[in-house]
Each structure stands twice: as C-alpha cells, then as structure tokens.
Amino acid sequence: MRRLAQALVVIVIVSMLVFILMRVVPGDPLYVYLGDDISFLTAKDIEAVRHELGLDKSLAMQYVDWMQDMLHGDFGYSIRRTRRAVMDMITERVPVTFHLGLLAFLISFIGIPMGVVAAVKRAKWWDTIVTVAANIGIAMPSFWLGILLMYAVGLKLKLLPLYGYTSPFIDFSMSTRQIIMPVFVLASTGIAASARQTRSAMLEVIHQDYTRTAWSKGLRERTVVIRHVLKNGLLPVITLKGMTFRNLLGGSVLVETVFNIPGMGRLAAEAVIAKDYLVVQAVILLIAVAVVLGNLLTDLVQGWLDPRIRFQ
C-alpha cells in the first residue's frame, strides 16, 4: 500500500509540474484557440471566450477543474482549429505506440542471452563482440541511428520503406516492413543495456561460493548457468527492464517523429510545437501513469525473484 500511495503522489506531482510548465511558456492559449479570428472580435467577445475556456480563473482553480475532468475521463478539446476531443486523438494514437513499444520491449530481451554467453565465454571473441556492440548501442542516439538506417537500408538499398505506418489489421505485410527499422531503433538501447548488465551480473555471481560449490559437484555447465548463475543474477536485469520500459516511452517521441509514425510520441511533439496545452498535459500525464505502473510491476517481479525484498 505504501508503494501505491507513493505512486499516486508521483502522479499528482507530475500533473502539477506539467500544468505549471504549460502555463509559464510564452504565448496565451486564447490566441492559439482563436487564431486569425481574434482580429474580428471585440475585447468583450475575447473575454467571453476566455471565460468559456476557464482561463479567467486562478491557476489553482484551473488545475482543480482539469484534474476533476481527467478523473471523469474528460480530457477536454484541442485548442487548435480542429477542436477535436483530446480523448479521441489519444485513442487513435495509443494502439500505434503500443504496437511499436511492445515489439521493441520484447526484442530487447535478446540482450539477456547475449550477456549470458558473453559472461560464460569471458575474454573470448564472443565476449568482445557483445561488449563492443553494447557500448555502441548505448552511446549512439536513437534519432541518429534512425537516420542512418533510413539512408542505408531505405534510401540506398531500398530494402524497406523509409517512413510511415500501416495497421497490421489492414496490411500485415506492409506493416511488418514499415516497423522493422523503428522497432529496431527503439529496441537497440534496451538490447545493449540488457547485454551489458546481464554480463556484469553474471560475472559477479559466477565468483560466489555457492556457484563454485555447484561447479565442484560436477554439474553440467548449462545446469550451473541456468539454475544458479542466471537465477541469482536476474534481479538487477529486471530492474533495468523497468527502466527500458520508461526509455521506450520517451524514445517514442524521437522515433515516431523521424519515421513519421502517427503515435503518442509524435502527437506530443506536434502538440508542444502547436502550444496545444490540453493535449500536451493529457499525453504527459498518461505516460507518467504508464511509467509508474511499470515501476510497480518491476517491484513485484523483484519481490517474486528475491523473497528478501519485502513490500508493505
């Protein structure tokens, strides 16, 4: 219960921060809402619109009204000319980001067996390859990797589409070809980090007394690695996977923008540029909720792997 309470506090703090930040940025949301029409309105008309949007209230009251509406599932309406419901805009984009993020998250687990083999074959050619590849994967920015892939694979070799997204329910073949590059870019950091973390954790466990005892009993290498080394070395890797989930949500902004994918990340970027503050607030708050839930799930898995970790 304490962790759940902490999660709720984090969500409230994030909501307050994003609300305040969107109010202190230059520009009046009212002018964004009215656009060119503002030149045809009188001062009285402008104040009437301001009252209609609730912008004449104090910041505290605006925040309370916004949170109450959010709790009732009312995310408001875009202040751009479309005047679309924010909830409709989000529900259109969530499946796209979920599709990419889920595939990237699952693929990132490839780093675990890579790290295991690197640790078991320490100081050999496979260890060197994994270590170098992991360092490159962690150091290279995702947007730069995306641009390189678009140039080499899409533009020069013409093996895959440069950008775009098609639902797998509409055209599975085209959808698969379109998401290969963005999913790889999203997963690359997770694969690299998992490989390096798994290797480090495995090397630490390999030198423990209980591992030496297992070796001395004449157990097969596979048995020792899976039952003793990997089981006890997974805890820090699971913690890392929770961070990978968070990084995927953050990385989706860049990847979806680079590959022109209509997901939540691109929606957030477009809303920031357009100063569509209700959309920005809703998207960031939903991402914060997803991150908090991911952290809670990570804690539960850690407790399952290590009974010494107690939850209240």
Image (spheres, grey):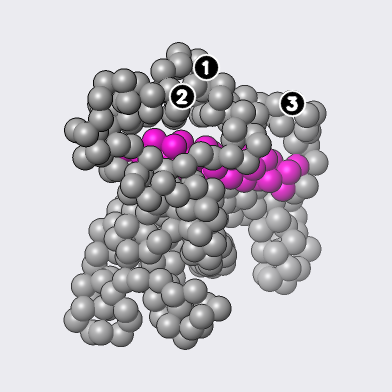
Tag 1–tag 2 contact (CB < 8 Å): yes
Question: Is disc 1 placed on a helix, strand or loop?
Answer: helix
**Which dot, 1 or 2, sits closer to the camera?**
2
Q: Main secondary structure of the magenta part?
A: helix
Q: Which residue is mark 2?
A: 54
Q: Which residue is mark 3?
A: 2
Q: Name the foreground residue: 171 vs 296.
A: 171
Q: Earlier in the sequence, mark 1 or mark 2?
A: 2
Q: Earlier in the sequence, mark 3 or mark 2?
A: 3
Q: Is residue 264 placed above or below 303 in the rendered structure?
A: below
Q: Residue at x 44, y 29 (%)?
A: 53
Q: Residue at x 32, y 57 (%)?
A: 257
Can residue 81 be seen here? The reply is: yes
Q: Residue at x 52, y 77 (%)?
A: 168
Packing grade of label 2 (10 A; few <14, some 14-19, many >=20) is some
* Amino acid under disc 3: Arg
User: Gap between marks 3 and 2, in whole Å?
Assistant: 36 Å
Question: Is disc 3 placed on a helix, strand or loop?
Answer: helix
* Amino acid under disc 2: Gly
State the mark number for residue 14: none
User: Gap between marks 3 and 1, in whole Å?
Assistant: 29 Å
Q: Which residues are magenta?
A: 275-303
**Which dot, 3 or 2, sits closer to the camera?**
2
Q: Which residue is mark 1?
A: 61
Q: Residue at x 34, y 44 (%)?
A: 80
At which x and y percent is residue 246?
51, 46
Packing grade of label 3 (10 A; few <14, some 14-19, many >=20) is few
Using residue 297 as the reference point, say whether residue 291 is left or right of it: left
User: Gap between marks 1 and 2, in whole Å?
Assistant: 9 Å
